[in-house]
Image (cartoon, coloured by chain):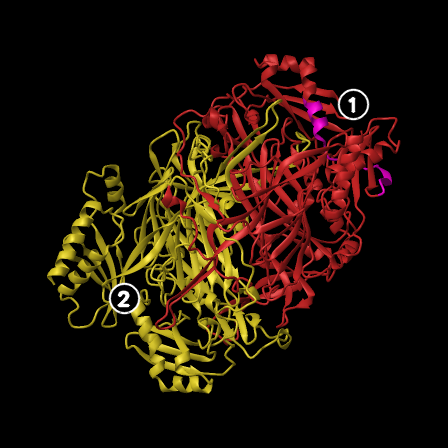
Chain colours: A yellow, B red
């Protein structure tokens, strides 16, 4: 106990001298929170289970004020806690320095908080002590040692009364493979009441063959010849060392600085991203805060065993909780640095995720700009600058799927957001073994990928919260629509050209954007700040693919819960409580706390503090190449400075001196 | 002469033992062609000027037959030549081995061939001996030593009679900058008759200030402090050496092999791209031939000095002729290999472009696939494979603009096509110096970028010719449309899901695709080849952004010439003469030989040899950051195997052994 106190104070003092108000909760802070609640005796009669513990957002104006003069005391550090006790969901705020509970309220809505790991593990283990399930396994010729079960959220399908906190359990065969997801025990559905932690419903409707294990294991040590083409490795070196520095959670690189935090729900949170112009030492704010707010994954199969698979990977499973420890040399290149993350276990104790983020300078062989000039007699000019960018990476593995999320900062002032999908498909067992057995009139809801294996059609909608503060607090959203002008007065030999019709969105209703509906550029500008020649400073959005929107009908329940996925881009007025695209409580949500519902308030967003919500969308129809494990597929968007700088900020960047670079290729 | 003959035979003999029927014309072959035509006495009375000399496509069936048994003699090597003589355009075919002219016809259509460098240089020099122009320069306070002129094609604007071969000349001030394009002498238009090589029309309609030179030079040696942020370099090493080999023009790497050729019009031509599955030594054809067929760049300004700027950069200026010599260490990474290209000068002599292509293995720090598995009790499995791909790069600099075109081959079997725009904007001089002077009702046709400088709105449409032969000669085009199905019979708690409605395009009319019109996947499949479980083998198209289409009215003349830019994707029946999207003769073309006109024949394309035309499109509205030189902006698409392989071909690829990799960062 003495030792514990020692560490406690040791960490506390470390914290007081280094902490940034936006730093994630530290291990010692988690312990303060755990102890503060424990010693409060508020929950002494019934057990308390933590579902979420994270930093409570400091008041934005207080934080901005502190930033403008950091000799003032920073905003107080407080934690926001969601916990379950006695079948109720509690919301608490704890002040960390005073170790006091500031508020404790009971959430009375229909929905449920983030699942924690421990309850999912406990639920997954229940079937193995449940006789009907053991009979189902036997019926399929399997031993319990070669079966594993995992957890699936149940969704909401129009139930009117308040539901219990339920979870479905599906089970898979391992056997001679670790690729469990491709060996489903189709036909069995198990429903668990999480508060009771017991199976409350069980069905085994039919048996189809469990697909074979052979050829599905993806581990290198399990591969047998003939092997695939063995390439020659390429690795990176930085002859002058790294170009970025990490001070606590603050990162600076080239003309950028920003704060990187971890949250068990959102994963990476980038705050205060600010960029410097070459002619000014001053950093100018671009992004006050950005993170992945929700990941909606609806499967497109209405049958009994599949209809409910309409997951909210961030709000239900935790995009940060699901973060995988990154592997040096493969998940990130050799020049990467790694950061750890901490979340609270079910009992509130801190748990470390080692290497939750990596940060590295990316060079893919491209140029940031180039030009060859032969137009001046007697001269041949070629100037090229290699493109080196800074990447912050997290990988979130939600059961079968791996999402690689990259935040890429460019010296041009752009920020590129990329999501890469890989991992394993969720497949459906079938008795079909050949495409010819599938009649035209039978809808597989997917494609036959292997014998007894259907890859079910589904979508991925990754929604970013982007609280942009372009060069200041109040911003506006501009729709610059490209319109064809017909020249009918004979004033030109041309008959047409396109020009912009620009509109500033006055209210939220003006800023619900389906990107592909019309040709347009979308910008966030600061009409209070002008360039020297008088343009509004701004940034614009550029899609780099994966801009699909949901095709579900508007009245379908999953769509009601994720109505925002019918538009790629929404703009709302800043509100500290509007952070989670599908609601603070997403499990069994009913769509009453989503971007759509907030946008219905139709607040004024012209020259206000605004938040942009951008959804990257993939329709995923599986092909055989996605089996037994998917090759990476990427999509994303870019925020690109648009009259933010006076001129191209890259011109005044000197080229590298390449003379002393290692040419290891030639030496070896 | 003896020496010449020696080299001639030396090269010929080299050629006979190494040449591939698709190899580009070699220097010695250019000389054979030049001499064959010269000694034929066909053009002895009037001078002959070469506009295009390139390899005539070998008959496809002959070539495929030779490929199936290369001990047979290859198809004969023939050259296709376009030349101007006596105000006429001649088309010739020369057989290289027999040194004979096979055909010589006169083209009688309205349009004109590719411009050659020498006539553009001659035309650009004319103004300096033209008194009205010298007066115009003086009026603007400039000396002729600080003025340069360049050439612009005139387009077609409804003229009915056959036009002369005209070119417009625009002039720019250099002075204290090499960035001539940002200092236009606005108001002056000079028209040159290329056959007469004299100025036939001259106007100087108005004077606006020439924008200042200060701050526009982009050369590093001209920059003054404060400099931009100086990053730390990142470079690549290949500890085990390069993974690809180049044999003549044939390249093999990992599971790919293909042929890379240079053409003065198309630039890079990739042929016979074939990929191997891990379980078969056999290479399977994917792409019989692919190249950039046209680059259409319409400016959106209908005024007298700008309306005609509707360029076809490949058909008018030569995408290959405009290729820049790539700079080692900056245009391409240190591990690149370079290839040279040869084209024919105006007199037929070979001219070398050093480093016209580079080939390198790209590693950008991403993974080809990954998965972390924690679902099996007691195990934590993480498998990650770094993504290393092979890039073939060319940079084409058409005056002010630089286009970086990348062909990227992936071990997954995908081919990624990326176009990167950089270089210098074509700007318009103006008397405006501040945005407040621009009234709402004045259309600038662009944006004020600097004092006296408007960045004019424009588009870039880069159209690829893709003669896909997916696992064989006859292919089909599939439109797999995603349709929402409403569940109305109460059979599911869900109300909707999406599924595919697949159609095979029967004729060309069924394959004119506007990508954003509806959610769909587009595939090329071989219905004659099935995977083991019975799926048609195929590849699908995936957009990675830049999918804009033309907004000009259908009856506008530039749009008639480039009507195909209203759809991103067309499929036509293979026809050896249908190679150039906007016609073989593009200068002053009238739209009578374009993808549209061919598609109007509405040929059957189901289970036929088919060609896919894919257009990458950018609407480019300039911002201040694009001045004085544009940061790179990329877009493109991917051809991804879709039931082409039995399973993911990457699983059986062993990871690299990283233990001996250099960690130069730590050592330095």
User: Who is closer to the viewer here, A161 or B303?
Assistant: B303
A6 relative to B43, above or below: below
Tell me whether the residue at label 2 lies in contact with that at label 1, contact meaning CB atoms closer than 8 angstroms. no
Subunit of label 1: B
* Quarter that holds the N terminus of chain B: top right
The residue that mark 1 highlights is: B196
Quadrant hosting residue B9: top right
Q: Is residue A165 left or right of residue A137?
A: left
Task: Inspect the magenta stretch and tell me whether residue A242 lies in it.
Answer: no
Residue B40 in view, yes or no: yes
Residues in magenta?
B98-124
Quadrant hosting residue B28: top right
The residue that mark 2 highlights is: A108
**Where in the figure is residue B173, as x and y percent of width and height?**
57, 20
Quadrant hosting residue A204: bottom left
Q: Is residue A78 left or right of residue B288?
A: left
Subunit of label 2: A
Q: Nearer the viewer, mark 2 or mark 1?
A: 1
**Is label 2 on the same chain as label 1?**
no
Task: Inspect the magenta stretch and tell me whether residue B121 lies in it.
Answer: yes
**Where in the figure is residue B77, as x and y percent of width and height?**
79, 46
* Quarter that holds the C terminus of chain B: top left
User: Who is closer to the viewer here, B24 or A134?
Assistant: B24
User: Who is closer to the viewer here, B256 or B177?
Assistant: B256
**Where in the figure is residue A559, as x and y percent of width and height?**
45, 63
B243 relative to B154, above or below: below
Mark 1 surroundings within 10 Å by alpha-carbon count, few (fewer than 14), some (14 through 19), many (20 or more): few
**Where in the figure is residue B309, as x and y percent of width and height?**
65, 32
């Amino acid at each position: 106990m003495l030792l514990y106190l020692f560490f406690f104070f040791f960490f506390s003092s470390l914290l007081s001298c280094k902490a940034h108000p936006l730093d994630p909760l530290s291990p010692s802070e988690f312990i303060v929170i755990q102890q503060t609640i424990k010693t409060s005796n508020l929950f002494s009669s019934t057990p308390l289970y933590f579902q979420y513990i994270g930093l409570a957002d400091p008041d934005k104006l207080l934080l901005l004020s502190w930033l403008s003069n950091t000799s003032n005391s920073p905003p107080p550090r407080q934690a926001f806690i969601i916990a379950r006790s006695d079948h109720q969901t509690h919301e608490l705020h704890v002040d960390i320095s005073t170790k006091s509970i500031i508020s404790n309220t009971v959430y009375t809505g229909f929905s449920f908080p983030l699942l924690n790991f421990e309850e999912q593990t406990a639920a997954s283990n229940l079937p193995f002590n449940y006789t009907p399930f053991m009979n189902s396994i036997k019926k399929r010729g399997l031993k319990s040692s070669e079966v594993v079960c995992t957890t699936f959220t149940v969704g909401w399908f129009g139930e009117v009364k308040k539901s219990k906190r339920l979870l479905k359990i599906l089970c898979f065969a391992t056997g001679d493979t670790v690729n469990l997801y491709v060996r489903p025990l189709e036909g069995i559905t198990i429903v668990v009441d999480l508060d009771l932690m017991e199976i409350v419903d069980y069905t085994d409707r039919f048996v189809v063959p469990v697909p074979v294990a052979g050829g599905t294991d993806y581990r290198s040590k399990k591969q047998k010849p003939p092997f695939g083409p063995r390439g020659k490795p390429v690795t990176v070196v930085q002859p002058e060392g790294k170009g970025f520095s990490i001070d606590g959670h603050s990162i600076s690189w080239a003309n950028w600085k920003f704060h990187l935090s971890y949250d068990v729900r959102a994963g990476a949170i980038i705050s205060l991203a600010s960029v410097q112009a070459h002619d000014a030492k001053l950093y100018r704010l671009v992004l006050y805060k950005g993170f992945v707010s929700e990941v909606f994954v609806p499967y497109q199969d209405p049958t009994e065993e599949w209809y409910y698979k309409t997951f909210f990977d961030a709000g239900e499973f935790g995009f940060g909780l699901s973060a995988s420890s990154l592997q040096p040399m493969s998940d990130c290149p050799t020049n990467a640095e790694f950061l750890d993350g901490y979340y609270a276990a079910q009992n509130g104790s801190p748990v470390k995720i080692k290497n939750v983020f990596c940060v590295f300078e990316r060079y893919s062989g491209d140029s940031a700009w180039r030009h060859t000039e032969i137009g001046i007699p007697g001269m041949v000019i070629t100037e090229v600058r290699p493109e080196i960018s800074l990447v912050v990476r997290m990988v979130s593995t939600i059961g079968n799927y791996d999402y690689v999320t990259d935040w890429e900062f460019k010296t041009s002032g752009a920020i590129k957001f990329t999501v890469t999908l890989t991992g394993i498909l969720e497949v459906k067992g079938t008795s079909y073994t050949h495409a010819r057995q599938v009649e035209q009139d039978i809808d597989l809801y997917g494609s036959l990928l292997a014998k007894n294996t259907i890859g079910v059609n589904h979508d991925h909608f990754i929604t970013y919260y982007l609280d942009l503060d372009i060069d200041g607090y109040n911003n506006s959203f501009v729709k610059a629509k490209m319109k064809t002008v017909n020249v009918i007065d004979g004033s030109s030999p041309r008959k047409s050209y396109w020009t912009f019709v620009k509109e500033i969105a006055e209210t939220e209703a003006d800023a619900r954007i389906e990107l592909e509906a019309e040709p347009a550029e979308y910008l966030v500008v600061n009409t209070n700040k002008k360039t020297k020649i008088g343009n509004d400073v701004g940034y614009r959005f550029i899609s780099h693919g994966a801009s699909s929107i949901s095709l579900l009908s508007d009245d379908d329940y999953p769509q009601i819960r994720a109505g925002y996925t019918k538009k790629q881009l929404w703009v709302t007025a800043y509100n500290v409580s509007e952070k989670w695209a599908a609601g603070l409580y997403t499990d069994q949500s009913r769509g009453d706390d989503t971007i759509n519902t907030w946008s219905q308030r139709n607040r004024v967003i012209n020259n206000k503090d605004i938040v942009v919500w951008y959804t990257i969308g993939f329709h995923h129809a599986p092909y055989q190449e996605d089996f037994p494990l998917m090759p990476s597929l990427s999509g994303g968007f870019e925020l690109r400075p648009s009259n933010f700088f006076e001129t191209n900020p890259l011109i005044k960047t000197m080229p590298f001196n390449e003379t002393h670079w290692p040419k290891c290729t030639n030496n070896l």
